[in-house]
Image (cartoon, helix red, strand yellow):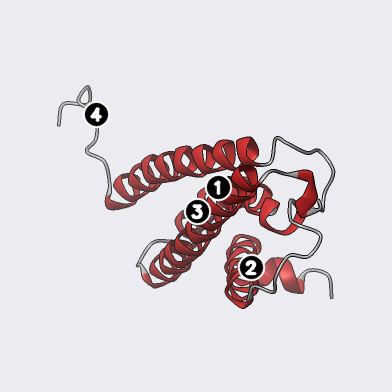
Amino acid sequence: MNGTEPASPSAFDKARTGLWTSLQKHLATVYAAETAFARAVAFTDTFPFAASAASEEQLQEYEQQRRALRDLFTDETTQLDTLVKAIRLKGYAEDEKKQLYLLLLGYMDIAASIFERLHTQVLTRQPADDDLAQTTDRFARVQKFARLNIKGIAGLLGGF
């Protein structure tokens, strides 16, 4: 190298760029699902809402979009769990891992605000959904794990 040529990207740089690109695509998908869900609940601005506040067609659309958002939440949580485990096992330096966790956490914070609609924009008599509860718990665990890895054990012990 003569000093003017750019250095080739490291494995970490490639991973960070790949993760960033992937998260942007996932975010676009989550935003699209949020938009569809928002349209499906546009008949009311009071939550929880009574089934009588909507027509049969509106309720069917609501249920369809709610299922789609819930399924996306489950899929995203599974993929995030896998990504967090993969980062943990990679041979990157701790600072590099923290960068990757920060990217994931930024995405997760945005996604969490969207997936929260599954808990807030509901019917007054929303049937129990054990799968949603399990996914919500799992998402929270993955989010906490990423936060802990960003803070590091030194950050946790610093308060003692």
Q: In terms of secondary structure, where does tag 2 sit?
A: helix
User: Which residue is painted at 58% across and 70% down in the image?
Assistant: 135
Of tags 1 and 3, which is closer to the observer?
A: 3
The mark nearer the N terminus, 1 or 2, is 1
The mark nearer the N terminus, 3 or 4, is 4
User: Which residue is painted at 38% across and 47% down in the image?
Assistant: 16
Label 4 sits on residue = 6
Q: Pinpoint residue 141: horizontal percent, then vertical percent.
A: 62, 72
Alpha carbon distance from label 3 to label 2: 15 Å
Position of 146 compared to 118: left or right? left
Label 2 sits on residue = 136
Of tags 4 and 2, which is closer to the observer?
A: 2
Of tags 1 and 2, which is closer to the observer?
A: 2
Q: Residues within 10 Å of mark 3 (few under 14, many from 20)?
A: some
Q: Pinpoint residue 45: horizontal percent, then vertical percent.
A: 81, 38
Q: Pinpoint residue 22: horizontal percent, then vertical percent.
A: 37, 45
Q: Which of 63 and 139 is in front in this view?
A: 63
Quarter location, residue 132: bottom right
The mark nearer the N terminus, 3 or 2, is 3
Alpha carbon distance from label 1 to label 2: 16 Å
Q: Could you tell me the amino acid type at mark 1?
A: Tyr
The mark nearer the N terminus, 1 or 4, is 4
Alpha carbon distance from label 4 to label 2: 44 Å
Q: How many labels does the image show?
A: 4
Quarter location, residue 131: bottom right
Label 3 sits on residue = 68
Asked if disc 3 and disc 4 are in contact, CB closer than 8 Å, the reply is no
Q: Could you tell me the amino acid type at mark 4?
A: Pro
